[in-house]
Image (cartoon, rainbow, N blue to C red):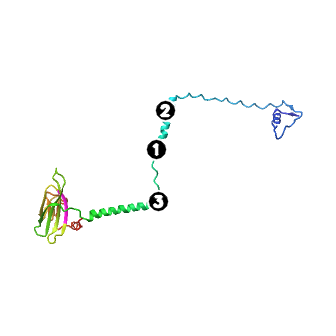
Amino acid sequence: MDFSYYKINKLLWRRSKEDGARIVHEVGLSMDKAPPALPAPPSPVVKPPRQPKPDPMIKMMDDIGKARDTFSCFKTLLNTPDPPKAPTGVSMKIMRLRAVVLVGFAAIGVLYFGLFNRIPHGTECEKSSSPDGIYIAERCFLEVQSFRSGNAKYVGRLFDAENGKLLAEHTFITPVPDLFWSPGFRSGEPSPHYVGPSVNFSRGGEDGDGSDISLPPSGWDRLLAARPRL
């Protein structure tokens, strides 16, 4: 019985502890078939060249830089504020209470500045009666605004001559205070129009600067004059 070279090798490989050895009798080697090709030799392992050892001084400086960066990151983490927390029921009540308090203070401020007359009475007051005897005007000094320009703050008041009721009150600033009655006149600036009777508390006053009160006083002037005085 002839076996090829491959079969002889297979028979020898089948030895194991579990199967035991198989005895093959009258085994001969046949040269009719070529032996299998030998395995290719392993490729040689090329080791990378060894890197030169770094300078100790450079390595120390690199280590110091890494430690500094780590400390900087840690410091930034400590200084970072915590994210805002979602408002809970208690915090929502506190926020609403604060809003109510702020609105209350704002309302008190509006009432104080809008519903009460805070203009002081003034000093060095001068009074004058209208030519028809219906009104009495009064001008009082309040305070100096500028010593260089001579501007001072005054208050002009208009009263009912019969009962002494305050009808109008204006504050104004002027360097030349005065008190006189105007019967009205026609003005050509900026366009021709008629300026009604008024009482004036300043010479050279401009329209809208508060230095005059029209006669009779407007409803807005009467409303402001009716405010209680603090």
Q: CA distance from mark 3 to mark 1?
A: 29 Å
Q: CA distance from mark 2 to mark 3?
A: 51 Å
**If the image is split into quadrants, where does the N terminus sit?**
top right
Q: Residues within 10 Å of mark 1 (few under 14, many from 20)?
A: few
Which is nearer the eye, 6 or 159? 159
In the picture, measured across the screen, residue 178 lies left or right of residue 28, that is: left
Residue at which label 3 appears: 88
**Residue at 19% in and 64% down:** 169
Does the segment drawn in magenta span residue 125? Answer: no
Q: Nearer the viewer, residue 145 or 56?
A: 56
Label 3, residues with CA under 10 Å away: few <14, some 14-19, many ≥20? few
Residue identified by numbered label 1: 76
Q: Which residue is mark 2?
A: 61
Looking at this view, is 131 or 142 the one in front?
142
Residue stretch in magenta: 168-173
Which is more N-terminal, label 1 or label 2? 2
- In this rendering, the answer to whether 113 lies above or below 41 is below
- Judge from the rendering whether residue 44 lies leftward or rightward of residue 36; answer left or right: left
Please check the rendered image and state whether residue 171 is part of the magenta-colored stretch, yes or no: yes
Which element carries disc 3, helix, strand or loop? loop
Q: Nearer the viewer, residue 157 or 46?
A: 157
